[in-house]
Image (spheres, rainbow, N blue to C red):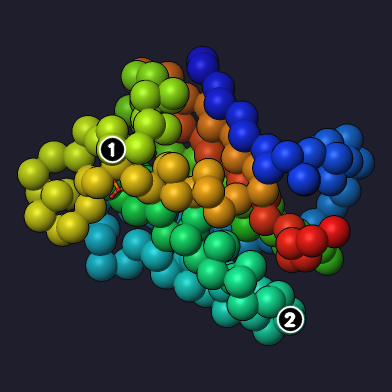
Amino acid sequence: MAEYWYVRPEKEEAVNFFFNSGRKPDYTQKFEINEKDFIHTGRATAEMKLLLKRLGVEATVLRRFAIIGYEAEINITAHSRGGEMICNVYPDLVHVVFEDKGPGMKDIEQSMTPGFSTADQEIRELGFGAGLGLPNIKKNTDMMHITSAENSNTVLEIIVFFKENE
Ligand SMILES: Nc1ncnc2c1ncn2[C@@H]1O[C@H](COP(=O)(O)OP(=O)(O)OP(=O)(O)O)[C@@H](O)[C@H]1O
Ligand SMILES: [Mg+2]
């Protein structure tokens, strides 16, 4: 199983603290994401975004969360056999795990390259397949961790902190 890590440099300490602290989330919600279900994909993210908004999370952070969530949900819908999104809400951050049922990525670094896409004709006709989803997730996240391999499942884990400048 290969893995890929990215941590926004300003958040390195906070991310390390998160993984070492063994904290428990205030709230957890799990959503199913189905293969090729382009009608419903994105709903989980929309619902979570609304919840975070009610908790008082600022608009720029909500926008970043939405971009990450939509891109990750669409990737499960387009490129996998389906999976789930597990959102863990803490007082100061949201931690999300996207896990699917395979078939996985041949080469994660290649998947992360802007413009790389294995999207087929059907997916391209729906307007996806520019190969910019994962780079866009990276641009907007404070942490991302991918584990995947060919003929295996893919797990994408992300963290977004509610305060951008501390
Ligand atoms: N959950 C996944 N399972 C298997 N492969 C994936 C998964 N997510 C992404 N990939 C692979 O990584 C490639 C790049 O993903 P990325 O989201 O950057 O672009 P895309 O989905 O092809 O196009 P876009 O997101 O711009 O519509 C995909 O084409 C696919 O090969
Ligand atoms: Mg994509």
Residue 50's quadrant in the figure?
bottom right
Q: Does residue 159 appear anywhere in the picture?
A: yes
Q: Who is closer to the viewer here, 27 or 125?
A: 125
How many marks can you see?
2
Q: Residue 56 bears which disc, if any?
A: 2
Going 85% across and 59% down the picture, which residue do you hit? 166
- Residue 83: tell me if it is visible: no
Q: Is residue 86 left or right of residue 107?
A: right
Residue 140 horizontal/vertical position (percent): 55, 54
CA distance for labels 2 and 1: 35 Å
Judged by depth in the image, the label closer to the viewer, 2 or 1, is 1
The picture places residue 7, in percent across and down from the top left corner, at: 68, 38
Residue 153 lies, with reference to residue 61, above or below; the image says above
Relative to 48, does residue 70 appear above or below in the rendering? Answer: above
The answer to which of marks 2 and 1 sits earlier in the sequence is 2
Which residue is found at the position 18% from the left and 58% from the top? 127
Q: Secondary structure at mark 1?
A: loop
Left or right, 131 with respect to 42, comes to: left
Q: Quadrant of residue 108?
A: top left
* Residue occupied by mark 1: 115
For the residue marked with disc 2, what is the amino acid?
A: Gly
Q: Is mark 1 within 8 Å of ligand 1?
A: no
Identify which amino acid the numbered label 1 is placed on. Gly
**Residue 40, percent from left and from top:** 32, 67
Decide: is 40 above or below 22: below
